[in-house]
Image (cartoon, rainbow, N blue to C red):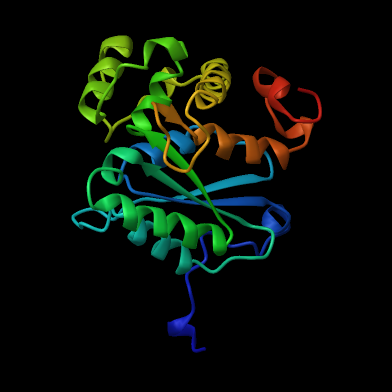
Amino acid sequence: MSLTQRKPRPLSRDTDSLRDDRLFIVACDDTYAPKQYFGFFRFPRVQIYVIPTPKDTHQCHAIDVLQRLKEIEREDDDELWMLLDADHYIEGSHLREFTRILKEAREKGVSVALSKPCFELWLLLHHLDKSAVHELTNAKETETALRKVIGEYNKTNLKQEHYPLDALKKAYLSAKALDQLTGGSDIPESNTSRVYLLWQAIFAKALPSQIPPELIGLLPSVA
């Protein structure tokens, strides 16, 4: 393969400081919010690299998200994730194709963190208990609820102060409990955000010394 044909690397690990980093490569169907959100959290020797949907394109379907992961060069111990919103995929004729793509992702070793109805439900769980999000039916309602709670919401300009570490812990625990009510299938029967599964994988590969005190209780070894 020529240099011009090589797949892109999400980061360079040519230096000692990056050589042993645990790398999570996350492709999403959103252009703005997830990339900003995960950029708020910096842990030693843990890298979360988010591949958003490119601006000014319509490549936001699950098959496009999976394709972006295929185009990234990776190492054997890197983890690949898709971050998806259910409201794009589970209505009408889209469901069969979506189910097929989820099956293909599993076969290729790609994990999926699905939010129903959307990623903003995950953001909302930083501030509200799980019982307060059951009735939200679509992305618009969820964004309105988030805006009401934090006073503003613009997915192109998230504010780090809205998502402190203690709120991340709250979201993780609330989402984990909420997901137990969904029936456990690939297509959840009720509102949920499985973004907590991505964080669970991150915590599982981290050492206590790499995790802030606010989150230490979420490490599997001490939880």
Q: Position of residue 54 (x, y in %)?
A: 28, 55
- Seen as rendered, the residue at the extreme right is 221
Q: Residue at x 70, y 30 (%)?
A: 211
Residue sitting at x 28%, y 23%: 142
Q: How many marks?
A: 0
Q: Is residue 223 above or below residue 156?
A: above
| Nearer to the camera, 114 or 8 | 114
Residue 79, x across and y down, in percent: 61, 54
Q: Nearer the viewer, residue 217 or 17?
A: 217
Residue appearing at x 55%, y 25% in the figure: 180
Whole-percent x, y for residue 148 in the image: 26, 11
Q: Quadrant of residue 169?
A: top right
Nearest the viewer among 159 and 101 is 101
In the figure, residue 146 lies in which quadrant? top left
Relative side of 99 to 76, left or right: left
Quadrant assignment for the C terminus:
top right
Asked whether 113 or 38 is in front, the reply is 113
Return the residue found at the far bottom: 2
Residue 158 position in % (x across, y down): 34, 29
The answer to whether residue 194 is above or below residue 73 is: above
* Position of residue 102 in the picture relative to residue 219 (left or right): left
> Could you say which quadrant of the image residue 177 lies in?
top right
Q: Residue at x 67, y 55 (%)?
A: 18
